Amino acid sequence: MAAVEPYGLVSNNANQQQQDHQKQTQQDNNIDYSQRAQWLRAAVMGATDGLVSIASLMMGIGAVKRDVKSMLLAGFAGSVAGASAMAIGEFVSVYTQYEVEVGQMKRDMMMINHNHKNNNNNDDDDVEIGGLEKKRALPIPLQAAFASAFSFCVGALVPLLAAGFVRDYDIRLMVVVIVASLALVVCGFVGAMLGKTPKVRSCVRVLIGGWMAMAITFGLTKLLGSSGLEI
């Protein structure tokens, strides 16, 4: 005969589960997802750019060169150049944002000090300054630059490793496309999960964009190669 738990024990377990759920919900609500934007945007964008750029570059070289060495050399050169460009561009962009926000904070503080001299209301000023400090989170240029460059290299490794172990030309191109497509879906899913955005929409958007980039690069390079230009 099955043992029956006392009603009080069942009620306590239900209350404990409800309290744990409320605590988890409160913790999720207290997370400021805008604070993640500094490194999340750089990391996800860097990985996606590295994946799409190098896969498209290798597809373009593959359109006119059948040997694996040419594809790998082009992919490696593109990885180094792309990671460097992403780091420099991200640093300049985020540092500019940093200077703009610092300037705005100084203007806001000057306005608060001006109101303080006119109104002599210390309590309101303290509340306003505290709210201003909590509201503003300055971006970190070096963090964004490193995240962008590192994630670009990680994304670029995917098509490089996929093509490096395949000798047959046709199979190599298919493997690059398939592996890059799967990695694009992962990038879209991870970005949506960390940013708390719709996952399916994000995956589809990233996947279609990657397909378009690879198809356009392959098609235009193939057209250029078939026009009689020596490559």
Image (cartoon, rainbow, N blue to C red):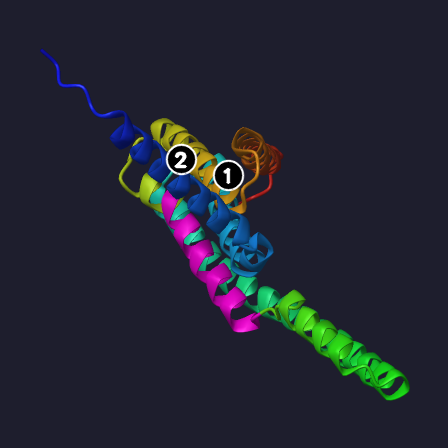
Where 132 sits versus 222, above or below?
A: below
Residue 226 visible in the snapshot: no
Question: Where's the N terminus, which quadrant?
Answer: top left
Q: Which mark is residue 11?
A: none
Q: Which mark is residue 176?
A: 2
Q: Give the residues in magenta.
A: 140-158
Q: In percent of the image, x 12 and y 14: which residue is there? A: 2
Label 2 residue SS: helix
Furthest residue toward bottom: 117
**Neighbours of disc 2 within 10 Å: few (<14), some (14-19), many (20+):** many
Residue tagged by mark 1? 188
Residue 147 on the magenta span:
yes
Q: Where residue 194 sits: x, y (%)?
A: 49, 46
Q: In percent of the image, x 27 and y 25: which residue is there? A: 7
Label 1 residue SS: helix
Q: Is residue 132 left or right of residue 10?
A: right
Amino acid type assigned to the residue bearing label 2 in the image: Val
Q: Is residue 231 left or right of residue 65?
A: right
Chain-order first, disc 1 or disc 2: 2
Q: In percent of the image, x 48 and y 55: which residue is there? A: 78
Which of the pair 22/93 is nearer the observer? 22
Residue 179 on the magenta span:
no
Where 41 sits versus 62, above or below?
A: below
Residue 113 visible in the snapshot: yes
Furthest residue toward left: 1
